[in-house]
Image: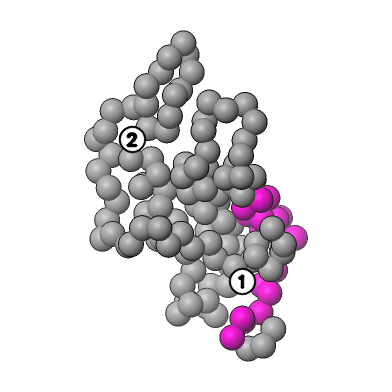
Amino acid sequence: MDQAQANRPVHHPSKPSQPGPPSSGSPPAAVTGGRVESWPDGSRELAEHLQRRLVISDRDWHALKAQRSRRAAEQLAGALVQLLGADDPAAIRGGEARQRAIALTASALAWLKGELRDPGCPDHGR
């Protein structure tokens, strides 16, 4: 993922917005031999709800784009969606989803450290 992609909000269009978080009263994931077999029920939906709440919309872009903590939280929520959406938690070697989660996490860390800055407004020819 290049720096321009890392600086933009992460959108996950596979599910429409929901008015609130899904219920979290589901049982935990199955455990076999001390190893978790899958993510707990409802985890992905909760992560997607969090990501939708944290994404900086086009309407708020100018006001919030330079807030490092906001940008980092947005990237971390996107990483969590990637991880929960397509990664096998029992796999030793991660696939593409894990690699995307790593890239988004690195981007979030760079925002927090001040290594990334606002790339400018995409609508103004930059």
The amino acid type found where label 2 is placed reads: Asp
**Disc marking residue 55:** none
Indicate the position of residue 44 as horizontal and vertical percent values.
40, 44
Residue at 62% x, 35% y: name it. 94
Q: Residue at x 46, y 44 (%)?
A: 85
Disc 1 versus disc 2: nearer the observer: 2
Q: Which residues are magenta?
A: 103-123
Most extreme residue toward the bottom, as rendered? 124
Q: CA distance from mark 1 to mark 2?
A: 35 Å
Q: Position of residue 74 (x, y in %)?
A: 52, 59
Q: Residue placed at 56% from the left, 56% from the top?
A: 75
Q: Which residue is drawn at the image coordinates 69% and 58% (left, top)?
A: 1
Q: Quadrant of residue 107?
A: bottom right
Q: Amino acid at mark 1?
A: Ala
Q: Is residue 119 covered in magenta?
A: yes
Which residue is tagged 1?
Answer: 66
- Farthest residue to the top: give it: 33
